[in-house]
Image: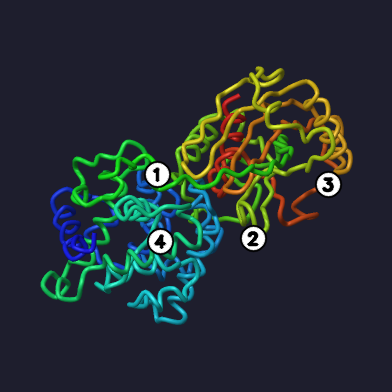
Amino acid sequence: MAKSLPNLAQRVITWQRQYGRHDLPWQNTQDPYRIWLSEIMLQQTQVATVIGYFNRFVDRFPDVDSLSNASLEDVLLCWAGLGYYARARHLHACAQQVVALWAGHFPTTAEALQTLPGIGPSTAAAIAAFCFGERTPILDGNVKRVYCRFFGVKGDPTSRVVVQQLWQRAKESTPIEALTVEQPDAMARFTQGLMDLGATCCTRRQPSCERCPLASDCVAKLSGRTNELPQPRTQRVMPERSTIMLLISRQIPDLAHGETCTNKMSADKVIADTSDNVNVLASKANTDVARHNQAVLLYKRPAKGIWGGLWTLPECRLAGDFNITTHQLTTTQLPLTAVKRHALKQKNTHTHTKLITNTSAIESSSKLIVEQWCTKHAIKNPTLLSMAAFRHTFTHFHLHIQPWLVEINDEVGFDPQTADETMQWVRVDQLHRFGMPAPVQNLLLNFTML
């Protein structure tokens, strides 16, 4: 193995020039802004998902100055649906620091880049290698898999001990200085090549070893352990949480068509094509004249935490007998009793949404909680319609969501716009102006299609 290390880098570089990816929208540039943006978006998210978001984001915020000057709400709107929203908050904070502390120019070393919000060691190294040719190792998820197989590294690749081993291997594999002098693009080619190998050859399942330039010295290949390495991480039981989401709807006849129910966002800040669901929400609502005065109540979540800073639906937290088991929630699903059904589809790779059973016991328990919420907020004689429950999986827990459609028939007794600035009535043809997580987009999409 020691004999193979001196030419490992050259093999990866040569392979990348001929077989690697060369047409991604953030390639063929040394612009730190675009490289940084792509690296942040690609964290735990597949390339196919990122491409559309990247192009729209760059169109909206073409440079670090425009991103720095934007509001966080604008940034979250453009990010909505991509998930892991702390990335967007860190992105905004990072842009502001680059402008304030670095005169609008990104630092040129991995060490300095790591002082900025949201930039870890591997991301910093990638930016430094791509943009400034720094000789520094990277270790993202795909590269971990390549090194685990090539060097035969055992153990959980997310554990501290194994990660330290992989960083050491990454340092040993970095092109020597003489190679970077001889080939000025060596670091960029090598860094991209490792990413390309992990994404296109050394895949998690059914790796294409016959196309890999490292196969002749790969420990996993030579020992027949490509399906065993990297070792799967230890399975753990995911915590279960439950909530009720309230899709509260009312008619607001005093609004003229084309106005909004809130002044939180102006028309020049609209990004109508943030995601497929937002496109559908916008086009459906705008073509349905009968709905143009119908509004729903949105709730803005706190800046920190799950879905931080995004607009969602009001929730009722659940307790007692509603916190039933995962097995009960994932049995054969029943049709909705009161609303037209549309299958909820989750296209993003970072989370998973699954329809679950809407049993009479769950419906009865949650209905009582919804009625109590309405009474507390002086909503009289609402029409309550249960919607299909579903499970949304985050990184660290499952969230069981029971949605209810609450149609207000009489005058509502409280005005959330004066009682609580985090709640806003928003007309259905204006929903595309608000950054929302994917499950909420899906629920509102179903609602607008009724």
Q: Are marks 1 and 3 in contact (CB under 8 Å)?
A: no
Q: Say which of marks 3 and 4 sits in front.
A: 4
Query: For mark 2, what is the residue?
Result: 304
The residues tagged by marks 3 and 4 sit, at their Cα atoms, a distance apart of 38 Å
Q: Say which of marks 4 and 1 sits in front.
A: 1
Residue 356 placement: quadrant = top right
Question: Tag 3: Cα neighbours inside 10 Å, few (<14), some, or many (≥20)?
Answer: few
Disc 2 is placed on an element classified as loop
Query: For mark 3, what is the residue?
Result: 414
Residue 126 visible? The answer is no
Sequence-wise, the earlier of marks 3 and 2 is 2
Residue 145 visible? The answer is yes
The residues tagged by marks 2 and 1 sit, at their Cα atoms, a distance apart of 25 Å
Q: Are marks 4 and 1 in contact (CB under 8 Å)?
A: no
Disc 1 is placed on an element classified as helix
Q: Amino acid at mark 1?
A: Thr
Q: Residue furthest left?
A: 182
Q: Is residue 105 left or right of residue 76?
A: left
In the rendered image, residue 393, in percent from the top left (x then y), is placed at 59, 41
Question: Tag 2: Cα neighbours inside 10 Å, few (<14), some, or many (≥20)?
Answer: few
Sequence-wise, the earlier of marks 3 and 4 is 4
Residue 372 placement: quadrant = top right
Residue sitting nearer the eye, 229 or 31: 229
**Residue positioned 68% across, 44% down in the render:** 239
Q: Amino acid at mark 3?
A: Phe
Query: For mark 4, what is the residue?
Result: 61
Q: Is residue 213 left or right of residue 205?
A: left
Q: Is residue 182 left or right of residue 205?
A: left
Query: For mark 1, what is the residue?
Result: 49
Q: Amino acid at mark 2?
A: Lys
Q: Say which of marks 1 and 3 sits in front.
A: 1
Sequence-wise, the earlier of marks 4 and 1 is 1
